[in-house]
Amino acid sequence: MGCTAQDITTALRAGAAVVAEHRDELIQLDREIGDADHGENMDRGFRAVIAKLDTAGPETPAATLKLAATVLISTVGGASGPLYGTAFLRAATAVGDDTELDGRAVAAALQAGMEGVVARGRAEVGDKTMIDALSPAVEAARSVAESGADGAKVLAAAAEAAHQGAQDTEGLVARKGRASYLGERSAGHVDPGARSTALLLTAFAEAAGARS
Ligand SMILES: Nc1ncnc2c1ncn2[C@@H]1O[C@H](COP(=O)(O)OP(=O)(O)OP(=O)(O)O)[C@@H](O)[C@H]1O
Ligand SMILES: [Mg+2]
């Protein structure tokens, strides 16, 4: 059984819950190398996504992802709003009119999302951004999907790789975004956007795993 619009809705609710739970941690990470608003931005955005899902539950995976994209772009603000929004928008385009996503479709959506973030923000691996969580996540997702795994297993592999990638941003010097203004002083801190990416993927994986 593949991932339906209902499953994506459940995953987005789990994402909103994890962002709310880690709001202060994300604020603290952003305080260290940014402007202390990442937790607030993400919490505001995901609350708005849930509010919208409560009033209008879309019927297809693409429409659900597109709803998330639109709401995130208009409510998160900062650098991360348009980046996450673009990721969800590209993921929506990648799933097309598929009504049940298998593991390969989930991996392809994740990859398209990452490509959207790169197209928009021009960050490369090692720049200390959300790309350092997304890139290993996409690689892990693709390799697990190739072996025929379902969406839940693909997301679990992606989440694990994203956590490692986020943790590894601690040693990096930021070359993109606000943290890059700190130069060498940005090293020694985990990137907030990489951390939120890892948290979201874990929430999505747990939601998908609980269902199957
Ligand atoms: N060019 C980029 N490409 C990918 N990710 C980026 C880029 N710039 C910033 N980020 C991510 O965004 C996160 C910061 O998001 P946040 O919500 O705090 O926005 P912000 O930087 O405070 O925005 P602004 O500076 O516009 O107020 C960083 O931790 C990083 O992961
Ligand atoms: Mg910030």
Image (cartoon, rainbow, N blue to C red):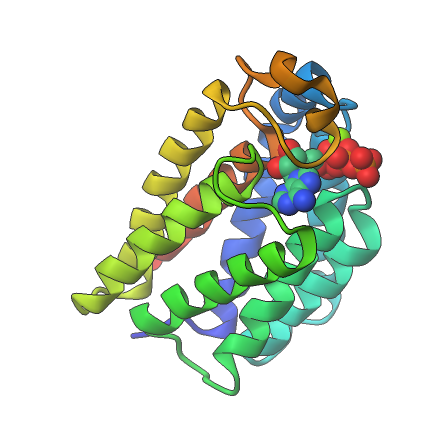
Q: Name the residue at 32% across, 57% down.
A: 141
Q: Is residue 27 visible?
A: yes
Q: Is residue 150 left or right of residue 168?
A: left
Q: Position of residue 103 (x, y in %)?
A: 31, 68
Q: Position of residue 29 (x, y in %)?
A: 63, 20
Q: Is residue 168 above or below residue 109?
A: above
Q: Is residue 193 above or below residue 63?
A: above
Q: Name the residue at 58% across, 73% down.
A: 92
Q: Name the residue at 51% across, 64% down.
A: 8
Quarter of the image containing the N terminus?
Answer: bottom left
Q: Is residue 68 left or right of residue 130?
A: right
Residue 106 or 14: which is nearer the viewer?
A: 106
How many marks overall? 0
Q: Is residue 203 visible?
A: no
Q: Is residue 122 left or right of residue 187?
A: right
Residue 111 lies in what quarter of the image? bottom left
Question: In the orientation shown, which residue stands out farthest toward the bottom?
Answer: 97
Q: Position of residue 79 (x, y in %)?
A: 75, 43
Q: Quadrant of ligand 1?
A: top right
Q: Name the residue at 58% across, 40% down.
A: 17
Quarter of the image containing the C terminus?
Answer: bottom left
Q: Position of residue 187 (x, y in %)?
A: 55, 16
Question: In the orientation shown, which residue stands out farthest toward the left?
Answer: 147
Residue 78 lies in what quarter of the image? top right
